[in-house]
Image (cartoon, helix red, strand yellow):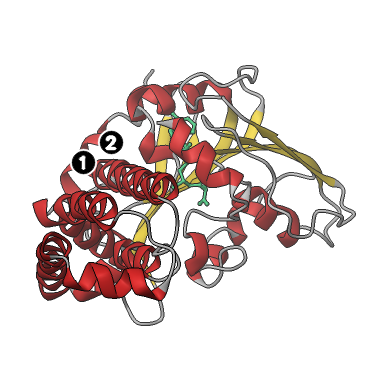
Amino acid sequence: MSNHWSEYWRQGHTTSFGDALSGNYEGVLQSVWLSAFNNLPTDFIAVDVGTGNGSVPLLLRETLINSAKVGTVFGVDLAEVQLADINKSEKSTIEIELLSNTASEKLPFADDSVDLYASQFGFEYSNIEQSITEASRVLKANGQFSIVFHHSNSMILNRNKNILRLIEQPQANELIEYLSEIAIAMGSMVTANDIARIKQDPKCETIRAKINQSIKYLVGYDELSAQDSQLMMFVAQFFKEGIFWPLAKKQQFIEFIKLQMDTLKLRLTELVNASFDENKLAKFIAIFEQNSLVLNELKVLKNEKNEILGWYLDASKVVNAID
Ligand SMILES: C[S@@+](CC[C@H](N)C(=O)[O-])C[C@H]1O[C@@H](n2cnc3c(N)ncnc32)[C@H](O)[C@@H]1O
């Protein structure tokens, strides 16, 4: 799983929202952290799991920049990650250290050593039973466990479920196969005469009609998701920029499209499986007591349009909770 995330973080994104969010989290997904950060002791250790390129550690440092607090926030991720470029040079008494190839199920921290265990859209991708036991092991007594995680009915999930349904349509795969067929059928394409030639070629025209049919089907099925999936953009690129490419380069590009679609499918399937509905949440909270955690707050986060963004949960470690 971490391979496609490593590839994603290598592209330099700050958050998992990619180009949809140019900098770090804003609005509710930023302000929800204020009290957890401000509650940290003067000299603290914080851990952010599933950190990606360190969006939450960066928020923490930014929030406490003018405070007297001194501390280290470790960002842990199973993938290869590197701190996003923003504010890198900022002087601060707060150190950020990112640990790649590190699982939330097995943290490299001593027992009872962490003041704040945080995660934003990361924890739920892990084995939650193992991760919560591990969270409880590393937290100090009264340490805080605060996570923002995916809600199965959030606007994020709904949009991504639609994209997943779209790219799982057989017509999406067929469309890519037709590109392979037409690349071969077109033969060598060098000048405008070749365009005239392929327009007269019955084989090319038959494949072109099939391509048009697949596009029509997919756009008719869900236009927004067809765009969001980027499949239509790739097809347009093939016929505009790529029309005079040599066959080998066209085939390379088609392989690239296949890889993009496969990775997207994988990422979205993981997202759907990671999200929490009320039932999954109830089962999760039921294991808090055996992990010495008491629930302080649980709420649904919404944006200014009243759309669901995710769950927020805050708990504390108590000592001898089950005695
Ligand atoms: C949706 S991204 C969130 C990244 C970041 N917190 C953000 O909000 O931008 C989920 C991250 O969790 C990481 N992840 C998944 N399973 C993990 C595990 N068991 N331990 C640590 N990290 C994990 C993935 O590699 C990925 O980088």
Q: Nearer the viewer, residue 301 or 190?
A: 190
- 30 vs 225, left or right, is right
Q: Gap between marks 1 and 2, in whole Å?
A: 6 Å
Q: Amino acid at mark 2?
A: Phe
Q: Nearer the viewer, residue 18 or 247?
A: 247
Callout 1 touching callout 2 (CB < 8 Å): yes
Is residue 103 placed above or below 48 in the rendered structure?
above
Number of numbered discs: 2
Query: Please, what secondary structure does the residue beneath circle 1 have?
Result: helix
Q: What residue is pinned by disc 2? A: 284
Find residue 280 and name its label: 1
Residue lying furthest bottom in this view? 305
Find residue 35 and name its label: none
- 92 vs 178, left or right, is right
Residue 207, quarter of picture: bottom left
Q: Give residue 101's position: percent from left, percent from top.
A: 57, 25
Crowding near the residue tagged with mark 2, few <14, some 14–19, many ≥20 C-alpha atoms within 10 Å: some
Q: Give residue 67's position: percent from left, percent from top.
A: 83, 58
Q: Amino acid at mark 1?
A: Lys
Residue 193, quarter of picture: bottom left
Residue 43: tell me if it is visible: no
Which quarter shows the N terminus? top left
Q: Give residue 228's position: percent from left, percent from top.
A: 32, 67
Q: Give residue 286's position: percent from left, percent from top.
A: 25, 33
The answer to whether the beta carbon of the residue marked 1 is less than 8 Å from any atom of ligand 1 is no
Residue 306, quarter of picture: bottom left
Query: Please, what secondary structure does the residue beneath circle 2 have?
Result: helix
Is residue 219 placed above or below 101 in the rendered structure?
below
Q: Nearer the viewer, residue 258 or 278?
A: 258
Tell me what residue is drawn at x 66 percent, y 48 percent: 57
Which quarter shows the C terminus? top left
Tell me what residue is drawn at x 44 percent, y 52 percent: 246
